[in-house]
Amino acid sequence: MPADPPSSLYAEVRRSRSAEFSAAPASSPREQAESRILEAAECVFACHGYRGSTLKQIADVAELPKANLLYYFGSKEKLYVHLLEQTLTRWNASLEDISPEDEPRDVLEALVRTKLKLARQAPQASRLFAAEVISGAPFLREYLSGALRDWVQVRCDVMKAWMVAGKLREAEPMWVIYLIWSTTQHYADFAAQIDYLGGAPQTDEDWERLADFVSSTLCDGLCPRQA
Amino acid sequence: MPADPPSSLYAEVRRSRSAEFSAAPASSPREQAESRILEAAECVFACHGYRGSTLKQIADVAELPKANLLYYFGSKEKLYVHLLEQTLTRWNASLEDISPEDEPRDVLEALVRTKLKLARQAPQASRLFAAEVISGAPFLREYLSGALRDWVQVRCDVMKAWMVAGKLREAEPMWVIYLIWSTTQHYADFAAQIDYLGGAPQTDEDWERLADFVSSTLCDGLCPRQA
DNA sequence: CTACAATCTGACCAACTGGTCAGCCCTTGA
DNA sequence: TCAAGGGCTGACCAGTTGGTCAGATTGTAG
Protein backbone atom coordinates (compact mmCIF):
# COMPACT_ATOMS: atom_id res chain seq x y z
CA MET A 1 0.00 0.00 0.00
CA PRO A 2 2.71 2.49 0.79
CA ALA A 3 3.77 4.08 -2.42
CA ASP A 4 7.41 4.76 -2.97
CA PRO A 5 9.50 5.89 -0.05
CA PRO A 6 8.70 9.47 0.86
CA SER A 7 9.55 11.47 -2.20
CA SER A 8 11.29 13.78 0.20
CA LEU A 9 14.06 11.20 0.13
CA TYR A 10 14.55 11.87 -3.52
CA ALA A 11 14.24 15.55 -2.87
CA GLU A 12 17.66 15.28 -1.29
CA VAL A 13 18.98 15.27 -4.81
CA ARG A 14 17.70 18.71 -5.45
CA ARG A 15 18.68 19.93 -2.00
CA SER A 16 22.23 18.78 -2.51
CA ARG A 17 22.59 19.91 -6.08
CA SER A 18 25.57 22.15 -6.42
CA ALA A 19 26.21 21.73 -2.72
CA GLU A 20 28.74 20.03 -0.49
CA PHE A 21 30.78 17.71 -2.59
CA SER A 22 30.04 18.91 -6.09
CA ALA A 23 32.60 21.66 -5.86
CA ALA A 24 33.55 21.07 -9.50
CA PRO A 25 32.82 23.82 -12.01
CA ALA A 26 31.58 21.16 -14.45
CA SER A 27 31.45 23.04 -17.68
CA SER A 28 31.45 20.47 -20.49
CA PRO A 29 28.13 18.82 -21.27
CA ARG A 30 29.70 15.47 -20.43
CA GLU A 31 30.69 16.60 -16.93
CA GLN A 32 27.33 18.22 -16.34
CA ALA A 33 25.36 15.18 -17.42
CA GLU A 34 27.61 12.76 -15.57
CA SER A 35 27.40 14.54 -12.25
CA ARG A 36 23.66 14.95 -12.68
CA ILE A 37 23.30 11.23 -13.30
CA LEU A 38 25.60 10.28 -10.43
CA GLU A 39 23.63 12.36 -7.97
CA ALA A 40 20.36 10.77 -9.01
CA ALA A 41 21.86 7.30 -9.04
CA GLU A 42 23.33 7.69 -5.57
CA CYS A 43 19.91 8.68 -4.35
CA VAL A 44 18.10 5.73 -5.85
CA PHE A 45 20.76 3.07 -5.25
CA ALA A 46 21.13 4.21 -1.63
CA CYS A 47 17.43 3.79 -1.17
CA HIS A 48 16.76 0.47 -2.92
CA GLY A 49 20.13 -1.20 -3.34
CA TYR A 50 21.54 -2.39 -6.63
CA ARG A 51 18.88 -4.87 -7.57
CA GLY A 52 15.96 -2.85 -6.32
CA SER A 53 16.86 0.19 -8.40
CA THR A 54 15.87 0.71 -12.02
CA LEU A 55 17.47 2.82 -14.69
CA LYS A 56 14.07 4.29 -15.47
CA GLN A 57 13.75 5.58 -11.95
CA ILE A 58 17.25 7.03 -11.90
CA ALA A 59 16.55 8.67 -15.24
CA ASP A 60 13.35 10.20 -13.89
CA VAL A 61 15.12 11.62 -10.84
CA ALA A 62 17.90 12.97 -13.04
CA GLU A 63 15.30 14.34 -15.46
CA LEU A 64 17.07 12.77 -18.40
CA PRO A 65 16.04 10.08 -20.85
CA LYS A 66 17.09 6.58 -19.86
CA ALA A 67 19.19 6.11 -22.99
CA ASN A 68 21.29 9.03 -21.87
CA LEU A 69 22.48 7.26 -18.73
CA LEU A 70 23.52 4.32 -20.83
CA TYR A 71 25.30 6.59 -23.29
CA TYR A 72 27.54 7.89 -20.51
CA PHE A 73 27.93 4.87 -18.27
CA GLY A 74 27.37 1.88 -20.53
CA SER A 75 25.40 -0.24 -18.11
CA LYS A 76 23.62 -0.27 -14.79
CA GLU A 77 26.47 -2.19 -13.23
CA LYS A 78 29.15 0.24 -14.42
CA LEU A 79 27.15 3.14 -13.05
CA TYR A 80 26.79 1.42 -9.71
CA VAL A 81 30.46 0.49 -9.47
CA HIS A 82 31.50 4.02 -10.46
CA LEU A 83 29.39 5.32 -7.61
CA LEU A 84 30.87 2.92 -5.10
CA GLU A 85 34.41 3.82 -6.12
CA GLN A 86 33.67 7.51 -5.97
CA THR A 87 32.34 7.04 -2.45
CA LEU A 88 35.37 5.10 -1.27
CA THR A 89 37.72 7.67 -2.78
CA ARG A 90 35.98 10.50 -0.98
CA TRP A 91 35.96 8.61 2.29
CA ASN A 92 39.64 7.84 1.98
CA ALA A 93 40.36 11.50 1.47
CA SER A 94 38.96 12.35 4.89
CA LEU A 95 40.91 9.79 6.90
CA GLU A 96 43.64 10.92 9.23
CA ASP A 97 46.83 9.13 10.05
CA ILE A 98 47.55 7.51 13.36
CA SER A 99 50.60 6.67 15.45
CA PRO A 100 51.25 4.90 18.77
CA GLU A 101 52.56 8.16 20.19
CA ASP A 102 49.18 9.84 19.81
CA GLU A 103 46.82 10.05 22.74
CA PRO A 104 44.00 7.49 22.31
CA ARG A 105 41.39 9.96 23.44
CA ASP A 106 42.41 12.48 20.80
CA VAL A 107 42.46 9.92 18.02
CA LEU A 108 39.16 8.35 19.00
CA GLU A 109 37.49 11.71 19.27
CA ALA A 110 38.82 12.81 15.89
CA LEU A 111 37.60 9.59 14.31
CA VAL A 112 34.14 9.99 15.77
CA ARG A 113 33.92 13.58 14.60
CA THR A 114 35.09 12.75 11.09
CA LYS A 115 32.63 9.89 10.76
CA LEU A 116 29.77 11.97 12.10
CA LYS A 117 30.60 14.73 9.66
CA LEU A 118 30.41 12.22 6.83
CA ALA A 119 27.13 10.86 8.16
CA ARG A 120 25.76 14.35 8.04
CA GLN A 121 27.25 15.56 4.76
CA ALA A 122 26.88 12.39 2.73
CA PRO A 123 24.16 10.24 4.24
CA GLN A 124 23.28 8.83 0.83
CA ALA A 125 26.78 7.51 0.36
CA SER A 126 26.64 5.86 3.73
CA ARG A 127 23.32 4.20 2.94
CA LEU A 128 24.61 3.10 -0.44
CA PHE A 129 27.50 1.40 1.28
CA ALA A 130 25.24 -0.11 3.94
CA ALA A 131 22.84 -1.55 1.39
CA GLU A 132 25.73 -3.07 -0.49
CA VAL A 133 27.13 -4.69 2.66
CA ILE A 134 23.73 -5.98 3.79
CA SER A 135 23.31 -7.69 0.45
CA GLY A 136 26.58 -9.55 1.05
CA ALA A 137 28.97 -6.97 -0.44
CA PRO A 138 29.11 -8.65 -3.87
CA PHE A 139 30.82 -5.61 -5.42
CA LEU A 140 33.04 -4.79 -2.46
CA ARG A 141 34.76 -8.08 -1.77
CA GLU A 142 38.03 -6.83 -3.18
CA TYR A 143 37.96 -3.52 -1.37
CA LEU A 144 36.96 -5.00 1.97
CA SER A 145 39.58 -7.73 1.97
CA GLY A 146 42.18 -5.45 0.40
CA ALA A 147 42.55 -1.74 0.94
CA LEU A 148 40.15 -1.46 3.87
CA ARG A 149 41.67 -4.46 5.58
CA ASP A 150 45.08 -2.82 5.38
CA TRP A 151 43.77 0.48 6.72
CA VAL A 152 42.17 -1.33 9.59
CA GLN A 153 45.27 -3.39 10.31
CA VAL A 154 47.35 -0.29 10.93
CA ARG A 155 44.80 1.01 13.44
CA CYS A 156 44.63 -2.35 15.16
CA ASP A 157 48.39 -2.45 15.64
CA VAL A 158 48.43 0.99 17.18
CA MET A 159 45.54 0.08 19.45
CA LYS A 160 47.34 -3.04 20.61
CA ALA A 161 50.31 -0.88 21.56
CA TRP A 162 47.96 1.39 23.52
CA MET A 163 46.53 -1.61 25.32
CA VAL A 164 49.97 -2.82 26.30
CA ALA A 165 50.71 0.66 27.61
CA GLY A 166 47.52 0.55 29.66
CA LYS A 167 46.06 3.47 27.74
CA LEU A 168 43.15 1.55 26.21
CA ARG A 169 40.77 -1.10 27.50
CA GLU A 170 41.98 -4.61 26.69
CA ALA A 171 39.88 -6.08 23.88
CA GLU A 172 39.79 -7.28 20.31
CA PRO A 173 40.85 -4.05 18.52
CA MET A 174 38.35 -4.62 15.70
CA TRP A 175 35.57 -4.35 18.22
CA VAL A 176 36.76 -0.88 19.13
CA ILE A 177 36.61 0.14 15.49
CA TYR A 178 33.15 -1.35 15.07
CA LEU A 179 32.02 0.56 18.14
CA ILE A 180 32.98 3.81 16.47
CA TRP A 181 31.74 2.95 13.01
CA SER A 182 28.37 1.68 14.14
CA THR A 183 27.53 4.51 16.50
CA THR A 184 28.32 7.16 13.90
CA GLN A 185 26.98 5.53 10.74
CA HIS A 186 23.73 4.87 12.52
CA TYR A 187 22.73 8.51 12.10
CA ALA A 188 22.98 8.21 8.32
CA ASP A 189 21.77 4.66 7.71
CA PHE A 190 18.82 4.74 10.09
CA ALA A 191 17.86 8.36 9.51
CA ALA A 192 14.31 7.34 8.62
CA GLN A 193 13.87 5.58 11.95
CA ILE A 194 15.41 8.48 13.84
CA ASP A 195 13.06 10.89 12.11
CA TYR A 196 10.07 8.94 13.40
CA LEU A 197 11.40 8.28 16.90
CA GLY A 198 13.00 11.61 17.62
CA GLY A 199 16.46 12.72 18.66
CA ALA A 200 17.51 13.64 15.13
CA PRO A 201 20.19 16.29 15.21
CA GLN A 202 19.12 19.27 13.10
CA THR A 203 21.19 22.36 13.71
CA ASP A 204 24.95 22.72 13.70
CA GLU A 205 24.69 22.89 17.46
CA ASP A 206 22.80 19.60 17.65
CA TRP A 207 25.47 17.85 15.66
CA GLU A 208 28.15 19.38 17.83
CA ARG A 209 26.45 18.16 20.99
CA LEU A 210 25.94 14.72 19.47
CA ALA A 211 29.61 14.52 18.57
CA ASP A 212 30.51 15.56 22.10
CA PHE A 213 28.22 12.95 23.57
CA VAL A 214 29.33 10.03 21.40
CA SER A 215 33.04 10.78 21.55
CA SER A 216 33.21 11.43 25.28
CA THR A 217 31.05 8.43 26.10
CA LEU A 218 33.19 6.12 24.01
CA CYS A 219 36.43 7.65 25.29
CA ASP A 220 35.34 7.32 28.92
CA GLY A 221 34.30 3.74 28.22
CA LEU A 222 37.44 2.79 26.35
CA CYS A 223 40.22 4.68 28.10
CA PRO A 224 40.95 3.65 31.71
CA ARG A 225 40.49 6.50 34.13
CA GLN A 226 43.74 8.31 34.73
CA ALA A 227 43.16 8.46 38.50
CA MET B 1 30.66 -9.18 -12.70
CA PRO B 2 30.00 -10.57 -9.24
CA ALA B 3 27.21 -13.07 -9.48
CA ASP B 4 24.64 -13.18 -6.76
CA PRO B 5 25.73 -12.59 -3.21
CA PRO B 6 27.62 -15.55 -1.84
CA SER B 7 25.20 -18.44 -1.99
CA SER B 8 26.34 -19.14 1.54
CA LEU B 9 24.01 -16.32 2.48
CA TYR B 10 21.10 -18.32 1.21
CA ALA B 11 22.52 -21.42 2.82
CA GLU B 12 21.49 -19.87 6.09
CA VAL B 13 18.02 -21.03 5.20
CA ARG B 14 19.05 -24.61 5.34
CA ARG B 15 21.25 -24.09 8.40
CA SER B 16 18.41 -22.55 10.31
CA ARG B 17 15.74 -24.97 9.18
CA SER B 18 14.09 -26.49 12.21
CA ALA B 19 16.38 -24.46 14.42
CA GLU B 20 16.10 -21.54 16.79
CA PHE B 21 12.78 -19.91 16.29
CA SER B 22 10.85 -22.55 14.37
CA ALA B 23 9.88 -24.36 17.53
CA ALA B 24 6.49 -25.15 16.03
CA PRO B 25 5.63 -28.78 15.27
CA ALA B 26 4.09 -27.67 11.97
CA SER B 27 2.12 -30.72 10.94
CA SER B 28 -0.50 -29.61 8.43
CA PRO B 29 0.67 -29.06 4.87
CA ARG B 30 -0.37 -25.47 5.14
CA GLU B 31 1.86 -24.85 8.16
CA GLN B 32 4.75 -26.69 6.61
CA ALA B 33 4.59 -24.78 3.35
CA GLU B 34 4.05 -21.44 5.05
CA SER B 35 7.03 -21.74 7.35
CA ARG B 36 9.16 -22.97 4.48
CA ILE B 37 8.17 -19.98 2.38
CA LEU B 38 8.67 -17.53 5.24
CA GLU B 39 12.17 -18.78 5.88
CA ALA B 40 13.13 -18.43 2.24
CA ALA B 41 11.47 -15.05 1.96
CA GLU B 42 13.23 -13.73 5.05
CA CYS B 43 16.51 -14.76 3.51
CA VAL B 44 15.92 -13.08 0.17
CA PHE B 45 14.17 -9.94 1.43
CA ALA B 46 16.89 -9.44 4.05
CA CYS B 47 19.49 -9.58 1.32
CA HIS B 48 17.92 -7.46 -1.43
CA GLY B 49 15.15 -5.49 0.22
CA TYR B 50 11.54 -5.44 -0.90
CA ARG B 51 12.01 -4.12 -4.39
CA GLY B 52 15.19 -6.02 -5.12
CA SER B 53 13.66 -9.39 -4.32
CA THR B 54 11.65 -11.49 -6.75
CA LEU B 55 9.07 -14.16 -6.09
CA LYS B 56 10.92 -16.46 -8.47
CA GLN B 57 14.03 -16.25 -6.35
CA ILE B 58 12.17 -16.85 -3.11
CA ALA B 59 10.42 -19.79 -4.73
CA ASP B 60 13.75 -21.24 -5.83
CA VAL B 61 15.24 -20.95 -2.33
CA ALA B 62 12.10 -22.49 -0.85
CA GLU B 63 12.20 -25.20 -3.54
CA LEU B 64 8.56 -24.61 -4.35
CA PRO B 65 6.79 -23.39 -7.48
CA LYS B 66 6.17 -19.67 -7.57
CA ALA B 67 2.42 -20.11 -7.82
CA ASN B 68 2.52 -21.86 -4.49
CA LEU B 69 3.80 -18.78 -2.67
CA LEU B 70 0.95 -16.79 -4.15
CA TYR B 71 -1.53 -19.48 -3.20
CA TYR B 72 -0.59 -19.08 0.47
CA PHE B 73 0.24 -15.39 0.75
CA GLY B 74 -1.72 -13.75 -2.05
CA SER B 75 0.91 -11.23 -3.10
CA LYS B 76 4.52 -10.21 -2.74
CA GLU B 77 3.53 -7.33 -0.54
CA LYS B 78 1.43 -9.45 1.81
CA LEU B 79 4.29 -11.88 2.18
CA TYR B 80 6.69 -9.07 2.98
CA VAL B 81 4.39 -7.43 5.49
CA HIS B 82 3.69 -10.77 7.15
CA LEU B 83 7.42 -11.21 7.59
CA LEU B 84 7.90 -7.74 9.04
CA GLU B 85 5.09 -8.26 11.52
CA GLN B 86 6.41 -11.65 12.54
CA THR B 87 9.79 -10.08 13.21
CA LEU B 88 8.39 -7.27 15.30
CA THR B 89 6.29 -9.72 17.32
CA ARG B 90 9.30 -11.85 18.11
CA TRP B 91 11.41 -8.85 19.03
CA ASN B 92 8.70 -7.55 21.32
CA ALA B 93 8.61 -10.90 23.08
CA SER B 94 12.22 -10.54 24.16
CA LEU B 95 12.00 -7.07 25.64
CA GLU B 96 12.26 -6.60 29.37
CA ASP B 97 10.52 -4.01 31.47
CA ILE B 98 12.24 -1.09 33.09
CA SER B 99 11.76 1.10 36.16
CA PRO B 100 13.50 4.14 37.66
CA GLU B 101 14.42 2.03 40.68
CA ASP B 102 16.59 -0.28 38.59
CA GLU B 103 20.31 0.26 38.45
CA PRO B 104 21.23 1.83 35.08
CA ARG B 105 24.22 -0.46 34.69
CA ASP B 106 22.08 -3.58 35.10
CA VAL B 107 19.43 -2.39 32.67
CA LEU B 108 21.93 -1.24 30.05
CA GLU B 109 23.85 -4.47 30.29
CA ALA B 110 20.70 -6.55 29.97
CA LEU B 111 19.62 -4.54 26.95
CA VAL B 112 22.98 -5.01 25.26
CA ARG B 113 22.95 -8.75 25.92
CA THR B 114 19.41 -9.16 24.64
CA LYS B 115 20.13 -7.23 21.46
CA LEU B 116 23.35 -9.12 20.84
CA LYS B 117 21.55 -12.41 21.31
CA LEU B 118 19.03 -11.35 18.69
CA ALA B 119 21.80 -10.24 16.36
CA ARG B 120 23.28 -13.69 16.67
CA GLN B 121 20.11 -15.79 16.57
CA ALA B 122 18.18 -13.85 13.96
CA PRO B 123 20.61 -11.86 11.82
CA GLN B 124 18.31 -12.15 8.82
CA ALA B 125 15.49 -10.48 10.68
CA SER B 126 17.81 -7.66 11.67
CA ARG B 127 18.95 -7.15 8.08
CA LEU B 128 15.37 -7.28 6.85
CA PHE B 129 14.52 -4.48 9.24
CA ALA B 130 17.64 -2.51 8.34
CA ALA B 131 16.95 -2.73 4.60
CA GLU B 132 13.41 -1.55 5.20
CA VAL B 133 14.59 1.43 7.23
CA ILE B 134 17.32 2.36 4.77
CA SER B 135 14.73 2.47 2.02
CA GLY B 136 12.76 5.01 4.04
CA ALA B 137 10.64 2.58 6.10
CA PRO B 138 7.65 2.74 3.73
CA PHE B 139 5.99 -0.25 5.44
CA LEU B 140 7.00 0.63 8.98
CA ARG B 141 5.79 4.19 9.30
CA GLU B 142 2.93 3.17 11.54
CA TYR B 143 4.99 0.93 13.77
CA LEU B 144 7.83 3.40 14.16
CA SER B 145 5.65 6.34 15.03
CA GLY B 146 3.28 4.19 17.08
CA ALA B 147 4.22 1.16 19.12
CA LEU B 148 7.98 1.63 18.97
CA ARG B 149 7.73 5.29 19.81
CA ASP B 150 5.75 4.41 22.93
CA TRP B 151 8.25 1.76 23.96
CA VAL B 152 11.04 4.21 23.53
CA GLN B 153 9.23 6.97 25.42
CA VAL B 154 9.02 4.84 28.55
CA ARG B 155 12.77 4.21 28.46
CA CYS B 156 13.50 7.86 27.88
CA ASP B 157 11.48 8.88 30.90
CA VAL B 158 13.31 6.44 33.12
CA MET B 159 16.64 7.58 31.77
CA LYS B 160 15.76 11.21 32.46
CA ALA B 161 15.06 10.23 36.06
CA TRP B 162 18.45 8.54 36.23
CA MET B 163 20.10 11.66 34.87
CA VAL B 164 18.45 13.83 37.50
CA ALA B 165 19.68 11.39 40.14
CA GLY B 166 23.18 11.67 38.74
CA LYS B 167 23.24 8.00 37.82
CA LEU B 168 23.51 8.53 34.08
CA ARG B 169 25.46 10.93 31.89
CA GLU B 170 23.39 13.99 30.96
CA ALA B 171 22.31 13.74 27.34
CA GLU B 172 19.42 13.38 24.93
CA PRO B 173 18.05 9.98 26.09
CA MET B 174 17.37 8.85 22.54
CA TRP B 175 21.08 9.07 21.83
CA VAL B 176 21.71 6.56 24.60
CA ILE B 177 19.27 4.16 23.02
CA TYR B 178 20.82 4.66 19.59
CA LEU B 179 24.22 3.96 21.10
CA ILE B 180 23.03 0.56 22.26
CA TRP B 181 21.01 -0.31 19.18
CA SER B 182 23.73 0.62 16.73
CA THR B 183 26.60 -1.15 18.46
CA THR B 184 24.68 -4.39 18.76
CA GLN B 185 22.80 -4.47 15.45
CA HIS B 186 26.05 -3.81 13.66
CA TYR B 187 27.07 -7.43 14.16
CA ALA B 188 24.02 -8.64 12.26
CA ASP B 189 23.62 -5.95 9.61
CA PHE B 190 27.27 -5.66 8.65
CA ALA B 191 28.15 -9.31 9.07
CA ALA B 192 29.51 -9.46 5.54
CA GLN B 193 31.94 -6.64 6.24
CA ILE B 194 32.98 -8.17 9.54
CA ASP B 195 33.63 -11.48 7.84
CA TYR B 196 36.09 -9.82 5.47
CA LEU B 197 37.76 -7.54 8.03
CA GLY B 198 37.97 -9.92 10.95
CA GLY B 199 36.80 -9.81 14.54
CA ALA B 200 33.66 -11.84 13.86
CA PRO B 201 32.55 -13.64 16.99
CA GLN B 202 32.23 -17.35 16.31
CA THR B 203 32.00 -19.46 19.43
CA ASP B 204 29.72 -19.03 22.40
CA GLU B 205 32.76 -17.74 24.25
CA ASP B 206 33.44 -15.08 21.57
CA TRP B 207 29.90 -13.79 21.85
CA GLU B 208 30.15 -13.77 25.61
CA ARG B 209 33.37 -11.74 25.48
CA LEU B 210 31.86 -9.38 22.92
CA ALA B 211 28.83 -8.83 25.13
CA ASP B 212 31.14 -8.16 28.08
CA PHE B 213 33.15 -5.69 26.04
CA VAL B 214 30.25 -3.73 24.59
CA SER B 215 28.20 -3.61 27.77
CA SER B 216 31.03 -2.67 30.09
CA THR B 217 32.40 -0.08 27.67
CA LEU B 218 29.01 1.57 27.27
CA CYS B 219 28.26 1.37 31.00
CA ASP B 220 31.60 2.90 31.94
CA GLY B 221 31.04 5.60 29.35
CA LEU B 222 27.46 6.32 30.35
CA CYS B 223 27.42 5.90 34.12
CA PRO B 224 29.46 8.44 36.11
CA ARG B 225 32.16 6.80 38.20
CA GLN B 226 30.89 6.13 41.68
CA ALA B 227 34.07 7.44 43.29
C1' DC C 1 29.82 27.25 -44.72
C1' DT C 2 31.54 22.53 -44.19
C1' DA C 3 32.77 18.39 -42.20
C1' DC C 4 33.41 15.59 -38.55
C1' DA C 5 32.77 14.08 -34.05
C1' DA C 6 30.38 14.29 -29.76
C1' DT C 7 25.86 14.39 -27.81
C1' DC C 8 21.45 12.79 -27.53
C1' DT C 9 17.09 9.96 -27.93
C1' DG C 10 12.70 7.47 -29.57
C1' DA C 11 11.65 3.09 -30.93
C1' DC C 12 12.58 -1.35 -30.33
C1' DC C 13 13.89 -6.13 -28.19
C1' DA C 14 14.23 -10.37 -25.49
C1' DA C 15 14.03 -11.56 -20.83
C1' DC C 16 11.82 -11.18 -16.72
C1' DT C 17 8.23 -9.19 -13.36
C1' DG C 18 4.02 -10.00 -10.19
C1' DG C 19 -0.16 -12.01 -10.66
C1' DT C 20 -4.32 -14.97 -12.60
C1' DC C 21 -6.66 -19.05 -13.54
C1' DA C 22 -8.39 -23.40 -15.18
C1' DG C 23 -7.84 -27.64 -13.96
C1' DC C 24 -5.22 -31.29 -11.93
C1' DC C 25 -4.07 -33.90 -7.74
C1' DC C 26 -4.85 -36.04 -3.11
C1' DT C 27 -6.74 -36.51 1.33
C1' DT C 28 -10.71 -37.15 4.29
C1' DG C 29 -15.16 -38.17 6.13
C1' DA C 30 -19.49 -40.45 5.38
C1' DT D 1 -16.67 -46.09 -2.82
C1' DC D 2 -17.17 -41.64 -3.81
C1' DA D 3 -17.97 -36.81 -3.62
C1' DA D 4 -16.10 -32.51 -1.89
C1' DG D 5 -12.76 -29.36 -0.86
C1' DG D 6 -8.26 -28.00 0.18
C1' DG D 7 -3.74 -28.25 -1.89
C1' DC D 8 -1.16 -27.42 -5.87
C1' DT D 9 0.75 -25.83 -10.48
C1' DG D 10 1.78 -25.16 -15.67
C1' DA D 11 0.54 -22.01 -18.86
C1' DC D 12 -0.48 -17.70 -19.61
C1' DC D 13 -0.78 -12.30 -19.37
C1' DA D 14 0.21 -7.35 -19.41
C1' DG D 15 3.70 -4.41 -17.79
C1' DT D 16 8.53 -3.61 -16.82
C1' DT D 17 13.46 -4.63 -17.09
C1' DG D 18 18.37 -3.56 -18.90
C1' DG D 19 20.20 -2.79 -23.10
C1' DT D 20 20.73 -1.74 -28.46
C1' DC D 21 20.72 1.07 -32.37
C1' DA D 22 19.79 4.01 -36.23
C1' DG D 23 19.53 8.33 -36.89
C1' DA D 24 18.56 13.25 -35.49
C1' DT D 25 20.80 17.22 -33.25
C1' DT D 26 24.44 19.91 -31.59
C1' DG D 27 29.08 21.78 -31.02
C1' DT D 28 33.24 23.04 -33.15
C1' DA D 29 37.57 23.28 -35.74
C1' DG D 30 39.09 24.56 -40.35
Image: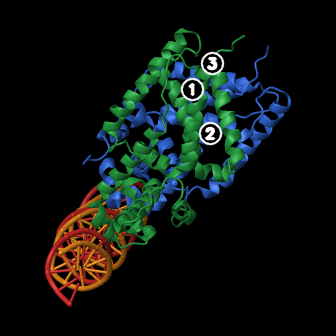
Chain colours: A blue, B green, C orange, D red
Residue A176 appears anywhere in the view: yes
Residue farthest to the right, as pictured: A165
Q: Secondary structure at mark 2?
A: helix
The answer to whether mark 2 and mark 1 are in CB contact below 8 A is no
Q: Residue at x 45, y 40 (%)?
A: B93
Residue B61 at x, y = what percent?
45, 68
Instruction: Specify few, some or many for label 1: CA neighbours under 10 Å numbering under 14, 14-19, or 20 or more.
Output: some
**Disc number at residue B107?**
1
**Residue B182 shown left or right of residue B53 in the figure:** right
**Residue B201 shown left or right of residue A118 in the figure:** right
Residue A98 sits above or below residue B82 on the image:
above
Q: Secondary structure at mark 1?
A: helix
Q: In front of the other: label 2 or label 1? A: 1
Residue A57 sits above or below residue B96 on the image:
below
Q: Residue at x 79, y 13 (%)?
A: A227
Q: Secondary structure at mark 3?
A: loop
Q: Residue at x 64, y 31 (%)?
A: B215
Residue B172 at x, y = what percent?
49, 19
Residue A198 sits above or below residue C18 on the image:
above
Residue A35 appears anywhere in the view: no
Q: CA distance from mark 2 to mark 1?
A: 40 Å
Question: Which is nearer the N-term, disc 1 or disc 3?
Answer: 1
**Residue A169 shown left or right of residue A184 in the figure:** right
Q: CA distance from mark 3 to mark 2?
A: 36 Å
- Tell me the chain of label 3: B
| Residue to which mark 3 is pinned | B223
The residue closer to the viewer here, A157 or B143, is B143
| Residue to which mark 2 is pinned | A93
Circle 1: residue type? Val
